[in-house]
Structures are given as C-alpha cells and as structure tokens.
Amino acid sequence: MRVTNTLIKDQIINFLAGNQERLANVQRQISTNKEVAVSSDDPVRFERAGRFKSLLAKNEQYLNNIEDGIAWIVMGAESLDVIYESLQQAKVMALQTRSDAVATTRTQILEFVDSLIEEMVQMGNTRFMGKYIFGGTITKDTEPFTYDGTSVTYDGNDGVLTRKGGEDTYLQINTAGSEFLNVFGAVIALRDALAADDGTAMDAAITQIDAVSPQLLNTIARAGSMQRRLELTRNNLEMANVNLQSYISQAEDVDLAEAILQFNAQELGYRAALESSARIMNISILNHLR
Amino acid sequence: MGGLSLLSEIGKQGMLLSQFSIQVTGKNISNINTRGYSRQRLDVNPILPEILSGFSMGSAISGDTLRRIREDFEDRQFWSQSSLESRYATEESLLRQVEGVLPSSNETGLGILLDDFWSAWNNLANDPESSVARTVVRDRAQTLAQSFNRVYREFISFQSTISDEINVRIDEINNLAAQIAELNRVNPGDSLDLEDQRDRLLDRLSELINIDVQRDGNSVRVFASGLMLVSGKASYEISADKSLNDEGISQITTIISGTSREVDVTSGELSALIAVHNEDIPDLLERLDTLAVTIADEVNAVHKNGFNLNGITGLNFFASTTEGAGSIAVDSSIVANVDLIASSDALGEPGNSNIAKALADLADKDVIGNQTAGEYYRALVGTLGNRIQEIGFLRSNQEKIVEHLEMQRQSVSGVSMEEEMTRMVQLEQAFTAASRLVSIADELTRTVLQMII
C-alpha cells in the first residue's frame, strides 16, 4: 500500500483519539466507582441493578413498617402485663379478705380494688402515638373502654391492624379489647361482692378471676408470638438487604483493582503511541536533502 | 544547420517540460494537507519521433495531459459507507441525548419516584389517622406527576429541536446540490481543482443523505433513492413535509419540492434525525403515556372505594383529565385538602387502612401486561439502553470501514512528500541536463561558425 503523509497523520490522530477515549472511559469508571451508570453502558446489568434497588427500597419500607409494628406490640404487651398484675392483686386482696375480714380493712380493700379497676380501664385505653391500641380499627375519638361505675363497655371493634412485612405478607400487630373485656367483669364482680360483704359472691368472683386469668395469659402469649414473628421477619429482611446491596454492587460497581490495572495498561499504550507518533512525525526526506 | 537548431530546440522543450513538471510537483507539495486534494501528474508523450518525422513542431506540452490520480470506484464506496456512518453517529448522539432527558439513572429516575410513591401509601397504611402521612402521599404523588409532565415536555421540545435541525440539514442539502449543478455548468473538465471541489461537495452531501452519483462526461448526476437531485446544470430542491399522527405527535417526510414525490431517506444525518423524530421519540412518549394513564387509573379505581377522614367516598386521587404523561396530575381537591385522601374501606374506622394497603400493594401488581409499573418503566429504559448500545456498535464498526476506505483513497490520491521531493530532484537534474543540451548546441554552432572564418 502506498503510504502518504496525510495517511500517517490521520492514522496517528485516529489512534490517539481511540487511546484517549479508552483512557477517559476507565478514568470515569474509577472516579465514579461505577461501571454501569446509565442504561446504555450495559442494559442488562443496569436493569438488574435497578430491580435490586427497587427491591431494596421496598425492603427498607417493610423494615420501617415492622419497627413501627414492634413498638406497637411492645406497648400493647406492657399494658396487658399491667392488667394481668392488677387482676392478680385483686385476687390476692380477695383471698386476704376471705381469711381476715375486719370491717376497716375491707373498706380499704374496696377502695384499692376500685382504684385497680380505674387503672385497668386506663391501661385498656392506652394510646400509642395518639392512637388507642386496643380499639380495633376505632383508633381515634372514641375510647375503647368506658367505665360508668357499675360496668365496663367496649366501644371498639374486632378490626385487625397489620403491618406489611413482605410482598404478600401482612403481620397482625394489635389485640382487640373485646378479647379481654371479661377481665373487667370479674374484677367488678369482686368489687360488688366486697361492697355487699357477701362471702359466697366473693368466692364466685375469685373463681371467675381464676377462669379469666389463663385466657388473659393466652392473649399476652399471642401478642408475644406476634412480636416474635415481626422480629423474625425483620431479621430476614436485614439479611436480604445485605445480600441485595452486594448484588447491586456486583451489577453496577467497578472492580477497582481491575480498572486500575486497565488504566495503567491504557496509559502505557497512550504514552507509547505519543512517543512513536512524535518520532515518526519528525522523519522526513527534507531532513536529508540539501 | 537544421540538425544543430533541432538540438537546441529539443533542449528548450526539455527545459520547459521539466519546469512545468516542477510546477505540478510544487503544487502537490503545497496541497499536502488539503482535504480532498488529489495529487496531479503530467503525462508526457515522447517529443522526438514527432519532430524527426518532419511534421510541424507544436508544443510538446500541449500534447501532454495533466490528470488527477483518483479512483472513481473508491469514491462511490466511500460515499455510500460514510453516509451510513454519519447516520449511525448522529443517531447514537441523538439517542444519548434522549437518554439524558429521560431520568434514567437508578438514583434519580422516575423508577425511584415510583418506589417513593408506593412507599408513601405504605406509610399511610401504618398511620392512617395522620395528616402528615397524607401530606407525604400528596407531595410524592405530585413529584411523580410533575416528573412525568417534565419528561413529556422535554421530549416534545427535543422533538421540535430535531425538526429545526432537519430543516437546517435540508437547506444544506439544497445548497450543496445547487453548488454541484453550478460546477457542472462551468465544466470542471477544464480544471482539476474544480473537480476536486465538486468531489468535496459530494463527500459532504453523502454525509447528509444517501446519494448515487453517475459521471457523465465532465458532469455528474446525483440521485437520492432514485429521485434526481442534480442533473447537468439543474438541481432539484427537497423540503420537509410536516403532519401530525393519530396521537397528535409531529411526523416529518421529505419530498421533492413542489411535488408529492417522497424521498426515501435511508442514510446520512438526515435519516437519523428523521428516524429519531418520527419513531424513537413518539414510541417513548407512547410508552410513558401508557405508564402514566395506567398508574392514574389503577390508583383511582382503588381510591374511589375508600373513605377519607371526612367520611366521603368515591373521590379520584389523580385528576380525571389524565390522558398521558403530559397531563397526569393529582386531583385539585386533594391538592387543596389532604384530608380527602382515602385510606379506609369502612366508614368511621380511623385505624382502618385497607385502601392505603391496597394502594401500596399496587407496587407489586402486574398492571401493564405481566409487568408492574416499576418493571414497565425499567424495561422502557432498558430498551432505550439496548438500542443505544446496538447503534453504538454499528457506528464503531462503520467508523472502521470508513476509516479504511478513507485510507485507501488517501493511498491512491494523497500526496507523499517523499515521492514529490524525489521527483523534484529528478526533474531538477533533467532541467540541468536539458540546459546543458542547449549550451552544447551553442558550442557546436560556434565551432561550425569558426570554421567559416
């Protein structure tokens, strides 16, 4: 092939431009730490990274939901514990009265049981972030439990509150007040028996308390297992997120060691091209003609 | 005596010939860096036999021809391939701009805004009594809708920029065709430089549009897809014909001005501009419209069944005027009052969040074919990315081909300093030798004259 000066010049320009482009490319990858920044860099890997990122965002949201749900359950469990304690105290008081019935102590005990009822109702109306936790889906404006001095009524419903913990997973977080409404009935029966100083009624009330206690314990245990389920889901999600993050990194991040090696190789190539270009451009017949 | 004067005549002819050849060489050297210059050579006929046969002498030079060293076949190859190259290169650069308009990165794109939107419903599902969670839902929905609107507007404005660009290119094509016709008229056969100039114009024309060139004596005929652009000294203008398609999106066809004959532009910058204007952008707009309308419809269908904080049901979340990415908007009553956002599916249950949950669940529901909204968007970005990659691949291949052809052309027509300088030395020596011939003739004549005395 006949080689002309312009041909050599063009070739040098093309080669150098190619070298520069490759160098700039590797440099961009190194400085952004991303091999795939836009779809056209690598559509498949870009799509994969996008999918994983979307999954990660969803999981973060699920984690939010679950943290919120756990706080709700813990709050509910604590209130139920207090109600259970109160129930046990009422029973202890009742047994004490049965064995040692002095009129003055009975009045004191009556007052104490009365305050226990107040406290239990208050616990039943516990609010978390301004919302009644035992009212089912009636979380606002209406208190779940009302105590009018003779009986406790439940104004909530059996609505189930859930938190989304996965694509098709909704986890229950609430206990409806209706489940432990009978606890109040038992303690009120005791209070009434104390007020009437009716030994038989008192015995009946103690039996009633013994009957509702295991039910309440069951309810508490169910709340515990709800909490456990949420925590398990949380652990799974956290683990999944660690994996997702590494998948995302695999899909779009640059292998820094490899990129730097490549950069060095390209740099070397570029320098060599520059060097040889500089030399060839200086060679001319003109240098040899007088 | 005739013999001696013939000798000095031969010497004179030789000197003139060398001198002229040196001029040609000098011209080649001065044009060593001129794009599109073809090196020139003087074809020399032997002087001697003509003179010896006793015919009239004439000028040795007039019988010789100066010609361009150039291969017609290589030119044709070059024109058709460089036409393709500029199509791919232009298309790639336009599509990269499209990719820039479409918020396509995994950090800031519409995909993220969609995720945020679903996530806001999820937060509302956690906290259905709250108006803060409602405000977040409204704000994210507005951000999403406005991003759709912005992308739509930018596409439309990009499309109209391309349409302007098409007109600029068409003007250039018409201009080039007119110049070529003008060069045909002045008959470039008389001047090699004008012929080079015409080939340069054809080089540029081939970058703009697919052309076929036929040489006809000293004139060229230029066709684009079988329709004549230049014939002899006449050129035919093309122009852009704009119309709207069914979706109201602008479409452009190229016609021979004053006729209805459509020019099928298959390569060159013009074809890339037309393809992106007529196909790529409308296609993307259509998909964005589908996405926006689907999101609005699906959300509204669920939202209508819900009760809001004011106990009202049957309200739209997105405006009922949503017809596409350009018009999607949050319903104005909800923008004004976030309490109107429904989260419950039963009246009077503030903690009920079944509607908010159902809306959050839409994130994972196959709403467009068997794709979720997020998947559909990612597929859209992926398709564009694929296309850019494919075109980029074609472009870089084509670049190599054109580079190679250009080198071939250079190899034939380009000026080599080494060649020309060597030639120069050679010609200088020939000139000296010829001048020596004249002085020898002079000496011989003098000797003869001395004999007379």
Image (cartoon, grey):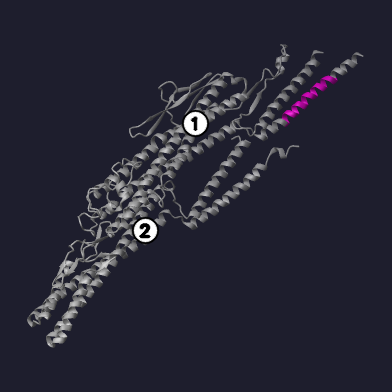
Residue A98 lies left or right of residue B380; in this view the side is: left
Q: Which residue is mark 1?
A: B168
| SS class, disc 1 | helix
Residue farthest top in this picture: B55
Q: Amino acid at mark 2?
A: Leu
Q: Which residue is mark 2?
A: A244
The residue shown at (15%, 83%) is A107
Q: Quadrant of the C terminus of chain A?
A: top right
* Residue A233 seen in the figure: no
Q: Amino acid at mark 1?
A: Val
Subunit of label 2? A
A18 in relation to B193, above or below: below
Subunit of label 1? B
Q: Position of residue A78 (x, y in %)?
A: 25, 72
Q: Quadrant of residue A174?
A: bottom left
Q: In the image, is residue B435 part of the stretch drawn in magenta?
A: yes
B365 in relation to B170, above or below: below
Q: Please state which of residues A144 and A277 is positioned toward the viewer in this rendering.
A: A144
For the record, the magenta segment spans B425-443
Neighbourhood count class around disc 2 (C-alpha, 10 Å): few under 14, some 14–19, many 20 upward: some
